Amino acid sequence: MMQVTGAGAAALLALTACSSSDDDSAAGSDSAGSASASGKLSGEVTVFAAASLKESFETLGKQFEKAHPGTKVTFSFGGSDALAASITGGAPADVFASASPKTMKIVTDAGDNAGEPATFVRNQLEIATLPGNPDKVASLKDLTDSDLKVVLCDKTVPCGAAAEKALTASKLKLIPVSYEEDVKSALNKVVLKEADAAVVYKTDVKAAGDKVEGVEFPESADAINDYPITLLKESKNTDTAKAFIALVRSAEGQKVLTSAGFLKP
């Protein structure tokens, strides 16, 4: 009896140890902090992100790679609608960060997300003019002047949809010289002096530095975009992708994003 009892106790201890080990392993998979502490993160993650996130996400990507040697973050920036279409069309990616819930819905409706998307920042529109604002643009209404060459984002992308919302609310009609595929393309028209002004995000005006001048307008408060982020169902490197999302949503990530001009969620 003593031998049987001892063997049973040993077996019970072994089972307990295995269970504890499995629990710890699961916790490490679900927690970016645990994974980071154990040094298990490795490999490449591909992040599809709205064009307006370029500077901030590249900074966060470098921080992530430095904190987790052996990892690599590859970005694909562009109009959120085009990125969403690529994902639903089968393009390989681990994470999607969109500039609006509407474009994120393209991915969730197709069932290509893994988990519920979370809003991590918000963004507000601003008018970008030539340096020194030579045309004295002071309001959204000023952009309707037929003598001005104004550029807007295409209505299918979030910055264009937001601009359209602000114009409609103000009962203003604006015919731009061109509609651009994403916010960086719209801004670049002003930077290259191919346009007098563009309606873009505050973050893009800030990123451009002295290449443009920003003009705020009150109607932008009614057209603020929420930015959601999600892990994608077809991710090939789930733990590392989750850890990158955790960085974006962390206090450290928020510091980088808000310093770029983004608003807190």
Image: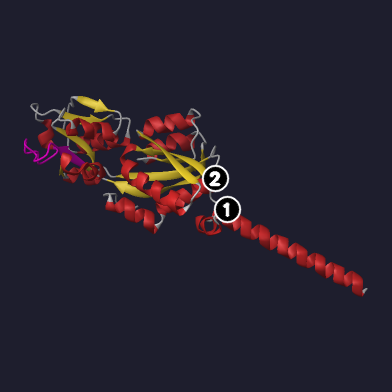
Instruction: Classify residue 151 by image quadrant.
Output: top left
**Residue at disc 2, secondary structure:** helix
Please state which amino acid type lies under the numbered disc 1: Ser
Tell me which segment is drawn in magenta: 126-140
Q: CA distance from mark 2 to mark 1?
A: 9 Å
Residue at 55% from the left image edge and 39% from the top image edge? 236
Question: Is residue 32 left or right of 204 when viewed as pictured?
Answer: right
Q: Are marks 2 and 1 in contact (CB under 8 Å)?
A: yes
Q: Which percent across, then down, holds residue 103?
A: 39, 36
In this rendered view, identify the residue nearer to me: 46 or 221: 46
Does residue 201 sit above or below 21 in this rendering?
A: above
Q: Is residue 212 visible?
A: no
Residue at 42% from the left image edge and 33% from the top image edge? 84
Provide the residue designation for mark 1: 29
Q: Is residue 7 visible?
A: yes
Q: Which percent across, then down, holds residue 146?
A: 9, 26
Question: Is residue 185 left or right of 171 when viewed as pictured?
Answer: right
